[in-house]
Image (tube, rainbow, N blue to C red):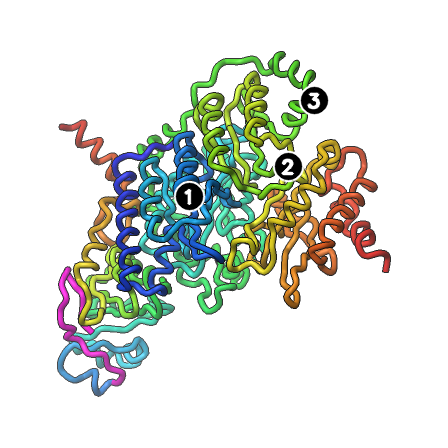
């Protein structure tokens, strides 16, 4: 993991003091709420429906056990004993007091954490593949480049008052687990003609009111040019992005309105002027950061563990958890263990302080003290010996974190919705809870197999409903919650936006509608075809007929 | 309004005018971009002319003028409209302008560091401004993570300068 040096540490501490000063000037009235608002947002502090909410950055989804214990402490001391992991690898605390937030930030700074730029119209936390450094299909660890971007984007004097928020995602793997094509900028590590690693650059993706898949801006960018190219991309956006309408202010609208070619031309022209300037990273700095992500001291193990195979044979529950929650590791004898924060009937992404502490202990015991947060609102122990998986699974069971449902219908992504959020027009959490309860039967859940279901409580799409295989959007229809269903969304390397299937459903009918869709899939699928495979083969017709009858 | 410049609150000696007659009167004047473009041959004869730029102005329009203009006023319609931050950097770094760049609009002390880093060296502020609050913000951070229009060395170079000098000594 990256460890702060005195410069990093100084900056984060100075930021805490700056915010402490801003809060006191707000309380004294020196700052108006209008002036304070963008400042507090850039420190992760929102004013929600019932209280302030503090969003803490988990840079590119990486946490140490020490940091996780600090989050547990904050949940316990300053909140109501739990935290909520978000769809952008961050964590939110829902009940902090304004005057205590500087103290929370000071505590976070002690463990090299912060809430810098987790909101506001600035460059947000850079997100990454949650399996970075562990995935078998990885070209290079994307965290190296995420940390470089994190530093460059922190307190960037030119890009702190952008037209709108700005999100960058990076993946170094063949399978895109970071949803880079629905980000403002998506970066894919690729190999150049002579074998060196560089970047494929995408821009203009996003969800919200106007969902769009990103356009490819560059096939290959040499690694040393990363920051100058990003600076050119941001500068064109800052100057020419729309500011007349906040719903048209994201870069996707600029790229769409002027066209990807015109955007690319403007960026390349800007870049030509700055690429040989001060932004070229010194090789020593790249090496310094690369060293921070040196793989842990893996043992030399056999690819297959007989003990592990025997446990799977003996214990069906364990075998089921392995089938859904464990992924292949790049090192023989190791595995990636996903911890589902989606128990049937639970709130997606919530974890109690006790669970956070427990998971920190498991990370120390079985995963070199390392943890990850996935954008699907789950946790990951990235480096677990296959031989340790059984003990890990038993331990997870003791704190109710052993739901064997990663990638299944139970693994629902949901925004906080009207239970917390002041923008929401409908509730998301109760719908997620009802659906996961309806499909709680594990035999059935695993028979249905891989399907993503995402729920947003309003058109802003924080629950990523557009890119769920099944998407649910909650809307307000004459004072009543209604739920619109889309089918066919994907957030991976085949990213696509789901299409609306037909009229929406009332809150007491939406769960039945989802069940009808799933039953239809089960009745028409071929062999081990996935939900999205069946949908792509047959189109929406059979689902439409099942939901609304034949016209 | 007063002017915050070089760490002090000073009286603003420049007058904003909107027509040629007033512009040609003695003393420093700040003129709208359109007036400059229309009358630049006449105005070039005057030493103390500054140009007020809208924040969506094409900076190339002044490409031949940057060495003849004494000041440029950048416009902030609100504190969160950050287009002029990019303009400031381009005017300093690309066009090499070394006159006064001032910020006009409801910017606040908490943005002072960003303004300075982008090349703005004067800010129009209310007469009763708490200067200490602005200066505190300008001094607050002991390091920077990126190069800008100022001469601060970004962390990614500073770290290795320190390392190199430590080895040398």
- The spot of residue A536 in percent (x, y) is 74, 45
Mark 3, residue position: A316
Mark 2, residue position: A407
Closer to us: A263 or A92 = A92
> Do callouts 2 and 3 point to residues on the same chain?
yes
| Quarter of the rendering occupied by the C terminus of chain B | top left
- The answer to which quarter of the image holds residue B11 is bottom left
> Cβ–Cβ below 8 Å for labels 2 and 3?
no
- The spot of residue A449 in percent (x, y) is 71, 35
Mark 1, residue position: A57
> Do callouts 1 and 2 point to residues on the same chain?
yes
Q: Chain of mark 2?
A: A
Tell me if A518 is positioned left or right of A95 in this view: right
Closer to us: A354 or B95 = A354
SS label for mark 2: loop
**Residue A64 visible in this rendered orientation of the protein:** yes
Judged by depth in the image, the label closer to the viewer, 2 or 3, is: 3
| Magenta span | B1-19
Give the mark, 1 or 2, whose residue is nearer the N terminus: 1
């Amino acid at each position: 993991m990256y460890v702060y040096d005195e410069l990093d540490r100084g900056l984060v501490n100075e930021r805490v003091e700056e915010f402490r000063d801003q809060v006191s000037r707000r309380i004294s009235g020196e700052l108006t709420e209008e002036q304070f608002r963008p400042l507090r947002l850039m420190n992760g502090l929102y004013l929600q429906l019932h209280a302030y909410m503090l969003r803490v950055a988990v840079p590119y989804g990486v946490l140490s056990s020490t940091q996780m214990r600090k989050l547990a402490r904050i949940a316990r001391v300053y909140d109501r004993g739990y935290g909520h992991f978000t769809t952008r690898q961050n964590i939110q605390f829902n009940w902090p007091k304004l005057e205590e937030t500087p103290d929370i930030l000071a505590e976070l700074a002690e463990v090299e954490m912060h809430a810098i730029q987790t909101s506001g119209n600035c460059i947000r936390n850079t997100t990454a593949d949650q399996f970075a450094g562990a995935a078998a299909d990885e070209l290079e660890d994307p965290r190296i480049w995420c940390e470089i971007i994190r530093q460059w984007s922190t307190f960037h004097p030119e890009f702190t008052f952008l037209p709108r928020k700005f999100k960058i995602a990076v993946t170094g793997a063949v399978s895109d687990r970071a949803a880079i094509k629905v980000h403002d900028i998506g970066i894919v590590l690729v190999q150049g003609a002579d074998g060196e690693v560089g970047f494929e650059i995408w821009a203009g993706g996003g969800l919200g009111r106007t969902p769009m898949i990103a356009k490819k801006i560059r096939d290959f960018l040499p690694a040393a040019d990363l920051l100058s190219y990003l600076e050119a991309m941001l500068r064109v956006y800052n100057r020419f992005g729309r500011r007349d309408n906040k719903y048209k202010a994201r870069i996707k609208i600029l790229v769409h309105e002027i066209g990807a070619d015109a955007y690319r031309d403007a960026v390349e022209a800007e870049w030509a002027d700055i690429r040989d300037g001060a932004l070229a990273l010194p090789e020593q700095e790249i090496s310094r950061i690369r060293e921070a992500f040196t793989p842990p001291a893996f043992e030399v193990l056999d690819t297959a563990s007989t003990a592990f195979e025997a446990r799977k044979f003996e214990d069906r529950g364990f075998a089921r958890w392995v089938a859904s929650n464990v992924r292949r590791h790049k090192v023989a004898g190791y595995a990636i263990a996903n911890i589902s924060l989606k128990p049937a009937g639970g709130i997606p992404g919530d974890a109690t302080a006790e669970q956070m502490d427990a998971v920190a202990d498991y990370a120390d015991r079985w995963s070199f003290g390392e943890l990850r947060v996935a954008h699907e609102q789950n946790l990951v122990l990235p480096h677990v010996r296959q031989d340790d998986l059984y003990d890990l699974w038993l331990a997870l069971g003791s704190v109710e974190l052993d739901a064997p449902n990663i990638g299944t219908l139970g693994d629902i992504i949901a925004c906080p919705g009207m239970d917390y959020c002041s923008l929401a027009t409908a509730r998301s959490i109760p719908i997620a809870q009802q659906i996961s309860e309806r499909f709680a039967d594990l035999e059935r859940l695993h028979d249905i197999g891989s399907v993503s279901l995402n729920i947003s409580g309003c058109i802003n799409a924080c629950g990523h409903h557009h890119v769920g295989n099944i998407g649910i959007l909650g809307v307000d229809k004459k004072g009543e919650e209604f739920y619109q269903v889309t089918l066919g969304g994907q957030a991976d390397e085949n990213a696509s936006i789901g299409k609306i299937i037909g009229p929406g459903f009332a809150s007491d009918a939406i769960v039945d509608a989802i069940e009808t869709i799933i039953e239809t899939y089960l009745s028409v699928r071929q062999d081990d075809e996935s939900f999205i495979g069946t949908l792509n083969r047959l189109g929406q017709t059979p689902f439409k007929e099942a939901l609304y009858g034949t016209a | 309004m007063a002017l915050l410049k070089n760490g002090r609150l000073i009286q603003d000696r420049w007058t904003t005018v909107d027509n040629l007659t007033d512009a040609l009167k003695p003393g420093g004047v700040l003129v709208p971009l359109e007036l400059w473009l229309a009358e630049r041959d006449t105005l070039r004869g005057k030493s103390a002319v500054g140009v007020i730029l809208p924040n969506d102005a094409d900076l190339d329009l002044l490409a031949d003028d940057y060495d003849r203009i004494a000041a440029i006023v950048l416009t902030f319609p609100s504190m969160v409209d950050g287009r002029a931050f990019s303009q400031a950097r381009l005017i300093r770094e690309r066009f090499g302008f070394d006159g006064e760049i001032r910020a006009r609009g409801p910017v606040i002390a908490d943005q002072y560091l960003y303004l300075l880093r982008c090349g703005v060296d004067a800010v129009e502020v209310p007469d009763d401004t708490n200067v200490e609050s602005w200066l505190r913000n300008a001094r607050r951070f002991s390091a920077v993570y990126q190069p800008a229009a100022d001469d601060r060395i970004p962390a990614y170079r500073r770290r290795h300068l320190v390392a190199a000098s430590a080895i040398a000594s």
